[in-house]
Image (tube, coloured by chain):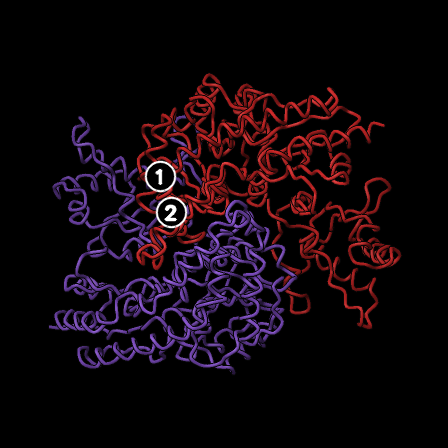
Chain colours: A red, B purple
Amino acid sequence: MAKIGWAGLLPTLDRDSIVPLYLQIYEHLREAILAGTLPESTRLPPERTMAEELRVNRSTVVRAYRELVAGGLIDQRVGSGSRVAHLRAGQPERSPAVPWWVTLPPWRVGEFPMVLGELAAKHEPGRISFVQGVAPDEPSPLAELASSFERVARDPRLVLSYGDSEGYEPLRGAIAERMRARGASAIEPKNVVVLTGSTQGIMIVAQSLAEPGDEIVVEQPSYPGALQIFQICGLRAIAVPVDEEGMRVDHVEAILRTRKPRFIYTMPSLHNPTNATANLDRRERLITIARRAGVPIVEDDPYGPLLQRDLPPLVALAPDHVVYLSTFSKTIAPSLRIGWLAAPRTILERLLMRKQAHDMATSLYVQAAVHDYLERGYDAHVAQLRDELLIRRKIADDAIAATWPASIRISKPAGGFYLWATTPRELRARPLLDASERLGASFLFGEAFYPGQGGDHNFRLALTAATRSEIAEGIARIGKAIASLRA
Amino acid sequence: MAKIGWAGLLPTLDRDSIVPLYLQIYEHLREAILAGTLPESTRLPPERTMAEELRVNRSTVVRAYRELVAGGLIDQRVGSGSRVAHLRAGQPERSPAVPWWVTLPPWRVGEFPMVLGELAAKHEPGRISFVQGVAPDEPSPLAELASSFERVARDPRLVLSYGDSEGYEPLRGAIAERMRARGASAIEPKNVVVLTGSTQGIMIVAQSLAEPGDEIVVEQPSYPGALQIFQICGLRAIAVPVDEEGMRVDHVEAILRTRKPRFIYTMPSLHNPTNATANLDRRERLITIARRAGVPIVEDDPYGPLLQRDLPPLVALAPDHVVYLSTFSKTIAPSLRIGWLAAPRTILERLLMRKQAHDMATSLYVQAAVHDYLERGYDAHVAQLRDELLIRRKIADDAIAATWPASIRISKPAGGFYLWATTPRELRARPLLDASERLGASFLFGEAFYPGQGGDHNFRLALTAATRSEIAEGIARIGKAIASLRA
């Protein structure tokens, strides 16, 4: 998760200006609210926090907020702080008298920027981070990957050209071959489009298969990046719970009886954040139900190649009914930004056209290097990575057993990047994060994974973000934070 | 321009099936029409062409097309061939009886996929291509670029992490520094967001500053990739002509008197395809007019660093009113997929949020390598490239003077990648392309650059796509094609 949020929205104060500081703050926030950059019901930072960030007196911020209240731009309530008000008049009319950025179209991101801003892992020295879902530092693909890059770097056909929007033909072949090895026998290179990461695929699918206002079905909890995209695209998420066998298909069935979502977004293998994997029966039932209702499935499968057991992806069971997305970000390195989609020919052209419009083509040079790496070190690396993930989980389980109270429940399925924790009623995840950060450990709080309300009693540990030796210590620090809050 | 279009839409015929071939073709096209993959008034390939592509008898295709006519799905008229009909009933209702891909949202790409399909440069041996706007093979950045990649390839912080959505801090600094050197003194690293090519920037701006149905102002002719994006985003282009001093600002002024476009998209320096560069007076007038009307300017500047004279980009003259886009695709290598935007703080957060939703972040590894290259070989390379472009243009001018009739007019401004030609009334560009390809030379026809009707008497030569020594021969072949059509 990249860093974004409040930092960017803070005014740059001119301390030499004749305009008083409170007025500078007021004007900045007023414009942001009118422009929709701060949408309705966004929480503003508490006055004290804002004052600290801006290095002004608290009374300066209090005065700026009071002006905003007076202007009907924010509401203040005891307990819930300051929130952007519902603007009855709607957006101001476009006219030369109003700055152009104040009349831009609505922003459609809701409170997401705030959440993502809070997610941002501050790189503080000494802090052990369980925040980002990055591949672990060991086993490292770096040495072999560097050789692959060297082999392609001097070939002008690979560096000095755009390549096709579909992607580098040999890489598409190698991807299709690996998908067939996992049971998706119908996947040919022509079904595969290489993407700049699978996030791009989620955006392309969201824009191609649905329109603003349409409903879709998503798991709850689910991957925050996908939720952010659906929100920006104006899609309304119908949430379906996840248990230790993955998406609750009985809920999907009930929903499809009365509603017509545009697609079902699911991560059936090593689900982010719960690590759950749907068994074969559940996979088949989901497909049957979706097929009967005529609703396509979007299978997001970044962790599928890391499964500890043989389970066919959904696309193997219904190649005409599933749009499949995956990536090398988790199995090789996120910095490559190489993912892919596999789709039936019926909609491939439509997806490809959007891919082309989004960024023309994915870096041919990086694609060629990844192809070279697939031919060499990749499979051995993935096998090592699978073992590493089990070892890390064992370390985490042992540390949790030793340092956390039994009232914190943790997700059972192992083998993936994550561990999903549920706190008891009296312990919310956000205060726990604050306390943990003070003690030198950080993680992601659960709200980020919830399309609607909820998640405030959950948090996720990415067991891959820290080094192996840091895991036990980081978990012990969180254990101390739990104890401090219960004391 | 990447390859896309008809090839992907052709049915895969099963010659062992009991379903007759004509019926397989009919069913395939019927589904594509109902699904909107072939939108209304799309031209189908002539029967003969389709038959050749599919390796079937012409009568098989004739029969398939006849069935489509009978079903009201296509119209056939003498002279204009077969076109997808207006489907009176609209889209079929979503129901389990109708395949899901038939009821997807409208596709909004008009005839563009067709045009792009036809653009596709077929890599035929011996053919000299003036099609793609790629950097020339000489001077080559490859050796130094490869060293830059080697230097960063073994650093786990650069390869095994996502990086921030804004981009790699040192690269943003180097970009801002170069923009300041061109006169944009207000640009700081914090105004810069690194993108996966500038195409991504056009998409982000189109989605952030406007909504489907909104009007925008674009040059005519203009960059086909941008036109495709605006079309997919549902934006309506108000076209403004370009002369040898760039966008006709007097037309912009007249338009802004009565209409309220969301933004003005312009390429003021070494414009694609005419190579025109707006002088300082025109730049200042455009800004004055846009500012007065409260309409922001989107400055697309892929070729700006290649200008032979010092001219400030628009963003230098009005940093609060211009969203600036550029790329290293033209100055280093397209395969890098590294571009950037620079925007005022008032809208930066909004653009950044979309960048994040589109592909999370641009490859940190490639960004770090490009930053390394900027510190070393870049400036010398760009200086050499400037010289190379003038030399190539001189070769082209000499060849044109020697082998083309004077009735073909060519754009005067030199120094960029392109040469824009206008044919006399009796000579259309598409038949000329056909004739040229038969003689072993290819280029892009003008319609691709026109947001509305027009461009059928224009074509573009990219003087960088061929080697220096091929230019004269390629132009001579086009000269022969012209002569053959006038005979």
- Callout 1 secondary element: loop
Question: Can residue B109 be seen here?
Answer: no
Give coordinates of residue A64: x percent, y percent: 83, 58
**Front residue (pair B319, B332):** B332
Chain of the residue where label 1 is placed in the rendered structure: A
* Quadrant of image for the N terminus of chain B: bottom left
Would you call the spot at circle 2 few (<14 residues within 10 Å), some (14-19), or many (20 or more)?
many
State the residue position of label 1.
Answer: A376
Chain of the residue where label 2 is placed in the rendered structure: A
Lower position in the chain sequence, tag 2 or tag 1: 2
Left or right? Give the position of B467 relative to A480: left
Give coordinates of residue A399: x percent, y percent: 67, 25
Residue drawn at x 17%, y 78% is B403
What's the amino acid at mark 1? Arg
Which residue, as the protein is rendered here, is positioned at the far top?
A281
Residue drawn at x 85%, y 43% is A77
Left or right? Give the position of A95 relative to B206: right
- Callout 2 secondary element: helix
